[in-house]
Image: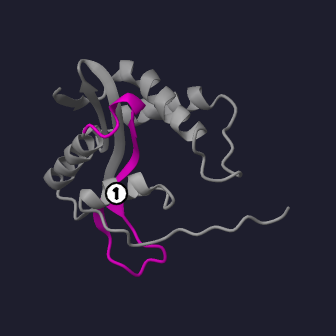
């Protein structure tokens, strides 16, 4: 079982969109994160735009000639708000999903490894992502790849 990583193509978009949306539907972090009408079509249009942008990263993993997962990300300038920290080039991983049948097979690590290689080759000083703090599997994955949690995002539901 060899994991193959390749750049995504247009025919991958519906598969990526469905997997990403189903992953979100099965674990939306908060109630206010309700899914918009026509989410799949909107997501697929967004992915198509990302595919055309050369600064974006999009990879598909295949295992046993089957779609096993994907990673999307981007590379570009990062500017501080407020503007008190020097601007720098940053890589960001937006989405990482692995088909349930291929979890714990190294697919996620292979996808992130490819993104890290691209980031290094692009002269990026840092690569970042977000993941749910209550997901021990995600935390373990990112820690095993050398990622260190540096900021915690907190929220409070307000009564309307």
Give the residue drawn at x 30%, y 61%. Answer: 143
Residue 81 among magenta residues: yes
Where residue 67 appears, as percent x and y from the top left, is 33, 23
Considering every residue shown, the one lying at the far right of the view is 160
For the residue labelled by badge 1, is the local secondary structure a helix, a strand or a loop?
A: helix
Q: Which residues are magenta?
A: 76-105
Q: How many marks?
A: 1
- Examine the rendered structure and indicate whether residue 134 appears above or below residue 64: below
On screen, residue 145 versus residue 93, left or right, reads left
Label 1: how many Cα within 10 Å (few below 14, some 14–19, many 20+): few
Give the residue drawn at x 18%, y 52%. Answer: 122
Where residue 24 appears, as percent x and y from the top left, is 55, 40
Give the residue drawn at x 14%, y 51%. Answer: 121
Q: Residue tagged by mark 1?
A: 140
- Examine the rendered structure and indicate whether residue 33 appears above or below residue 61: below
Where residue 27 appears, as percent x and y from the top left, is 57, 44
On screen, residue 56 versus residue 131, left or right, reads left
- Any part of residue 127 in sight: no
Name the foreground residue: 124 vs 21. 21
Residue 104 among magenta residues: yes
């Amino acid at each position: 079982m060899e994991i193959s990583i390749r750049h995504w193509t247009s025919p991958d978009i519906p598969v990526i969109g469905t997997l990403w949306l189903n992953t979100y539907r099965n674990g939306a972090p908060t109630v206010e994160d309700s899914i918009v009408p026509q989410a799949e079509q909107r997501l697929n249009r967004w992915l198509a735009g990302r595919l055309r942008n050369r600064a974006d990263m999009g990879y598909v993993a295949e295992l046993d000639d089957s779609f096993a997962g994907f990673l999307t990300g981007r590379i570009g300038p990062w500017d501080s708000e407020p503007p008190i920290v020097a601007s720098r080039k940053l890589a960001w991983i937006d989405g990482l999903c692995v088909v349930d049948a291929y979890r714990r097979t190294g697919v996620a690590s292979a996808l992130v490894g490819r993104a890290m290689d691209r980031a290094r080759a692009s002269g990026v000083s840092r690569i970042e992502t977000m993941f749910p703090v209550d997901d021990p599997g995600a935390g373990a994955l990112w820690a095993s790849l050398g990622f260190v949690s540096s900021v915690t995002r907190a929220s409070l539901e307000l009564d309307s």
